[in-house]
Image (spheres, rainbow, N blue to C red):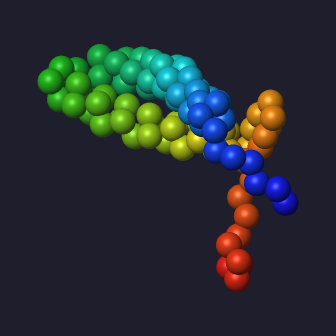
Amino acid sequence: MQELEVTWARVLSVWWLIEWRAIAGGLVTGGAVGAVLGVAFAFTDWDSGRAGELELVFGGIVGLAWTFIATRMALRKQYRDFRIVLLPRDGAT
C-alpha cells in the first residue's frame, strides 16, 4: 500500500472536520443538556451557584464525549484525495 505524504493541506482537512463537528455538536448537545438541567434545577429549587457547577461538569463530560465521536467521524471519512487507514505495525496483531 502506498503511503501519501502528510501535507499541511491534508492536516488542515482532518483538523477542520474535527473542529467544526466538535464545535457544532458541542453547541447542540451543550444547549440540550443545559436546557434539560436548567428545567430540572428550576423545578427542584436548586441553589443557582451549585447548579452552575453541576452544569459545568456535565457540559465538560458531554463535550469530551462528543469530541471522541467527531474524531471517529474524521477517521472514517473519505476525503477528497485520501482516506485514513489504521494498519497494524509489523508483527503486531
In front: 52, or 69? 69
Which image quadrant: the C terminus? Answer: bottom right
Which image quadrant: the N terminus? Answer: bottom right
In front: 71, or 32? 71
Picture coordinates of residue 27 (x, y %)? Answer: 48, 19
**Looking at the image, which residue is at 18% across and 20% down?**
48
Would residue 47 be found to the left or right of residue 35 on screen? Answer: left
**Looking at the image, which residue is at 75% across and 38% down?**
77
In front: 19, or 50? 19
Report how many numbered discs are placed on residues in the image: 0
**Looking at the image, which residue is at 77% across and 34% down?**
79
In front: 59, or 73? 73
**Looking at the image, which residue is at 29% across and 30% down?**
56
The answer to whether one can see residue 11 in this image is yes
Quadrant housing residue 15 = top right
Q: In this rendering, is residue 84 above or below 88? A: above
Would residue 4 be found to the left or right of residue 18 on screen? Answer: right
Residue located farthest toward the bottom when viewing the structure as drawn: 91
Quadrant housing residue 2 = bottom right
Q: In this rendering, is residue 61 above or below 88? A: above
Picture coordinates of residue 47 (x, y %)? Answer: 16, 23
Picture coordinates of residue 41 (x, y %)? Answer: 29, 22
Q: In this rendering, is residue 43 above or below 66? A: above
The answer to whether one can see residue 32 in this image is no
Picture coordinates of residue 12 (x, y %)? Answer: 59, 30
Residue located farthest toward the right when viewing the structure as drawn: 1
